[in-house]
Image: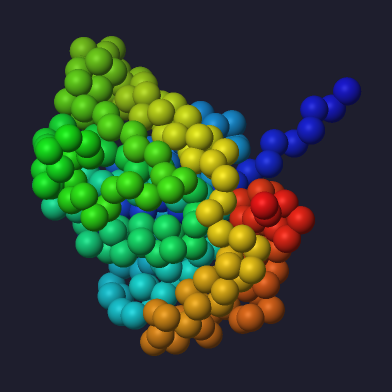
Amino acid sequence: MTEPKTESKKAYFAGALFNAKELLGNMLIGKAIDEFSQGRYECVLPQNLEVADARSVAIRNVDLLNVMLADVCIFNFDGSELDSGTVVEFMFAKMLDIPCAILRTDFRSSGDQKEGDPWNLMCSFYPRTETVLINGMSAYHGNVHGKATMFHGITDMCHHIAEQVVVALDKATAAAPIYTALEAKAVYKAARRFPGSGYSDLISLQNMSGLITNKQSRGLLNSAVSQK
C-alpha cells in the first residue's frame, strides 16, 4: 500500500543576507529544515530570488510577494540590532496572519524587555508566532567542536536548529487563524495595495482570490464554513 504524499508547505525564510556567513548559514539551515521535516516544509530563501548587483524597489516587491505567497514564515532575529528588512517582512506576515517561527541563535541579550524575548518588545507578542531561542555558542560546542569531520559537525548543528524550528512551525500552524473569512479577504486586498511602487502589478485580484481560497482549503485561513 502506497503511503499518502506529505503535503508540503512553502516556508519563506527571512534574515540578513549581506555577507558570505549569512548567505551560507541561511542556505544550510534552510536545507536542514527541508530535510528534517521530510518535505513538510520547503524553505524559500530570498537570497535565491535576488541578483547580485541590483538593489531596488523590484527586490522589495518580490520579497514581499513571496511573504504573501508563503504558507508559513521563518524569521532570523540574530544581531544586537534586528535586520530592518527582516522586521518589515515579519510585520507584513503578521498583517496577513501567516503562521511564523522566529529563530535566534545569537546568545547576546538586547532590546528593552526586562523579561521575555531578547529584542525590542515591538517585535513580540503576536498571534500564531512561536519563538526558538538557541545559544549558538553552546550549540557549536555541543555539535561541531571536536567532531571528526567539519561536514558532520555542521550537519549535526543545522539539524539541531532545524528540529526546533520544525516543532515551532507545527505549533504556529496549529493555532487558529485570527481573521474571519470576510476579514481575511479585506486584509489581503488592502495588503496588495499599501506597499505601492508597482507591488499590485505582481499579483492580480484574480490570483489573490485564488491564493486566499488555497490557504482556506488547507486551514491556513478561515473559510466561511469553518469560522465561528
Q: State the image coordinates of residue 58 (x, y, percent, origin top left).
A: 39, 79
Total numbered badges shown on the rendered structure: 0
Residue at horizontal 23%, vertical 39%? 117
- Asked whether 150 or 112 is in front, the reply is 112
* Residue at the extreme front: 228
Instruction: Specify the quadrant that holds the N terminus.
Output: top right
Residue 49 lies in what quarter of the image? bottom left
Q: 78 above or below 212?
A: above
Residue at horizontal 50%, vertical 78%? 190
Q: State the image coordinates of residue 65 (x, y, percent, origin top left).
A: 48, 69
Residue 194 lies in what quarter of the image? bottom left
- Asked whether 141 or 208 is in front, the reply is 208
Q: State the image coordinates of residue 133 (x, y, percent, origin top left).
A: 28, 32
Residue 69 lies in what quarter of the image? bottom right
Drawn side of residue 164 relative to residue 149, left or right: right
- Asked whether 181 or 46 is in front, the reply is 181
Drawn side of residue 179 relative to residue 131, left or right: right
* Residue at the extreme right: 1
Q: Is residue 56 visible?
A: yes
Residue at horizontal 65%, vertical 63%? 181
Drawn side of residue 20 relative to residue 59, left or right: left
Residue at horizontal 79%, vertical 33%? 4
Drawn side of residue 167 relative to residue 15, left or right: right
- Asked whether 69 or 188 is in front, the reply is 188
Q: State the image coordinates of residue 196 (x, y, percent, origin top left).
A: 40, 85
Q: Is residue 106 visible?
A: no
How are the colours assigned in the image?
Answer: rainbow
